[in-house]
Each structure stands twice: as C-alpha cells, then as structure tokens.
Amino acid sequence: MDIWNDFFGATLTIAGHDILWREVIGNGFGFLSAIFGMRRLIWAWPVGIIGNALLFTVFMGVWFSTPQEHSLLGQAFRQVFFIATSVYGWWRWNESRKGRAQGAPAITPRWATTRERLAYLAVAAAGIVLVQWVFLEVGVGWDAPRWYYWCDAWIFVGSIVATYAMARGWTDFWLVWIAVDLVGVPLLWHGGYYPSAIMFIVYGALVLWGFVVWKRAAREESPRPEPATADSTVG
C-alpha cells in the first residue's frame, strides 16, 4: 500500500508548477495507444484503457488529491466512456482480425457512408447540448465561465464519437480528433493541466499523420470491382 500511495501522490515540479506523475504516465499510455491505433494493432485498446483509468483519477480532482484542486468533469467522465468504448473496439477488431494473415492489420479502414456520417453528427450535436446542461447543473466545484461547459461538453462528446468511429474502422475518426484537439488544448491549459495540454499538441501532429496513413490504406486496401470480361459485355 505504501508503494501505491507513493505513486498515487508522486509529483514533479516544472516551471514552478506541481504535476502528477499519474498525468504524465496516463498521457504516455494514451500516446502509445494512438500509435498502435494508427498501425491498426489490437494493443491500441488495452493500452488505452490503462491510460484512461489513470487520467480519470487525475481529472476528478474533487475525489482525488490533485495540485489543480478542481475537476474537469468532461475530461474525467469521458475516460469512463473511453473504457467502455475501448472494450467494444477491442472486441470488434478481434473479430475483424479473424481470418487475416498473421501480422496483418486488424482492420481495413474506410470512410463512413453518408448515412453513417449524418447519424454520428446528429448524435454529437444532441449530445453536446445535453451534456453541457448536465455539467452546468452538477457544477465543477469552482466558478467556471459559461463557455467552459460548452467546451468541456464538446471534448466529452467528440472524444466518444472519435473512439467509436475508430472501433468501426472509419477514417473520419482522425478528423473528429483534430476538432477535439483544437478545443482541448486551450481548455486544459486554462485549467492548469499542462502535461495533458502539451500531450494534446503532440497528439495533434500524430493525428494528422494518422489521418494520412489511414486515408492511404482505405484507398489501397479497399476491395476493387472486378474488371469486365468479354463474356460479361456481350449482348
């Protein structure tokens, strides 16, 4: 227990700011999960789950001791949904991998269809409206401005949509992550979660590269129609 307590409360100081090692390590697992995801490896999911569990304890400051002394509810509870969605993604990628050659990627990426894209955009819009209201009613234990709840709601909902799209193998999920990063970096920095903010910046570069990789794979690995034969063109 002493070893666990020492790890749980361990901090490092950078530029006068106390930072939890849990936040650094949790983001490290998240970054590694993103690399595995870009390479379409099953390990992306269990590695990500470990990072999610650590980051939940970081962002839920009202339950756990943190230097920031306040919570980011959207950041905290999205870790719970990450874990649930990751279990689904882990199962789906395992099913997809069956019958593939040894060492082959778990899935073949594709763009979401128009119907699928409209569906997840509609769910995201409705989810943001609902979640920001819930966060506002619950409160965060400090005098947060109104815009904070909208931003936190988008990060919460957008992250879930992106993770679900990744589980389905949709190339769209990289674009959703870019949109999440654009809001997440300033919000995390404003809240004093500097390692996570920096991680989002680094992760943004990885997301751009991952988008290029998946887009290329979707084009090169997608099934192509059989060329017409002479017999099929007769008559």
Image: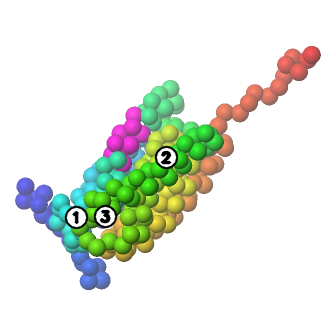
Which secondary structure, mark 1? Answer: loop
User: Left or right of 146: which side holds 98?
Assistant: right
Q: Which residues are magenta?
A: 82-91
Task: Tell me what residue is drawn at x 11 percent, y 60 percent.
Answer: 5
The numbered mark, 3 or 2, whose residue comes first in the sequence reads 3
Q: Amino acid at mark 3?
A: Leu
Residue topped by disc 3? 72
The numbered mark, 1 or 3, whose residue comes first in the sequence reads 1
Q: Position of residue 196 (x, y in %)?
A: 36, 66
Is residue 36 something one can see in this rendering? no
Which secondary structure, mark 3? Answer: loop
Give the CA distance from mark 2 to mark 1: 29 Å
Q: Residues within 10 Å of mark 1 (few under 14, many from 20)?
A: many
State the residue in front, 47 or 49. 49
User: Left or right of 57: which side holds 100?
Assistant: right
Against 230, residue 84 (above or below) is below
Q: Amino acid at mark 2?
A: Val
Dots 1 and 3: beta carbons under 8 Å? Answer: yes
Q: Position of residue 28 (x, y in %)?
A: 35, 60
Residue topped by disc 2? 123
State the residue in front, 231 or 54. 54
Task: Tell me what residue is drawn at x 52 percent, y 61 percent.
Answer: 179
Q: Among all residues in the image, which is located at the extreme bottom?
A: 16
Residue topped by disc 1? 61
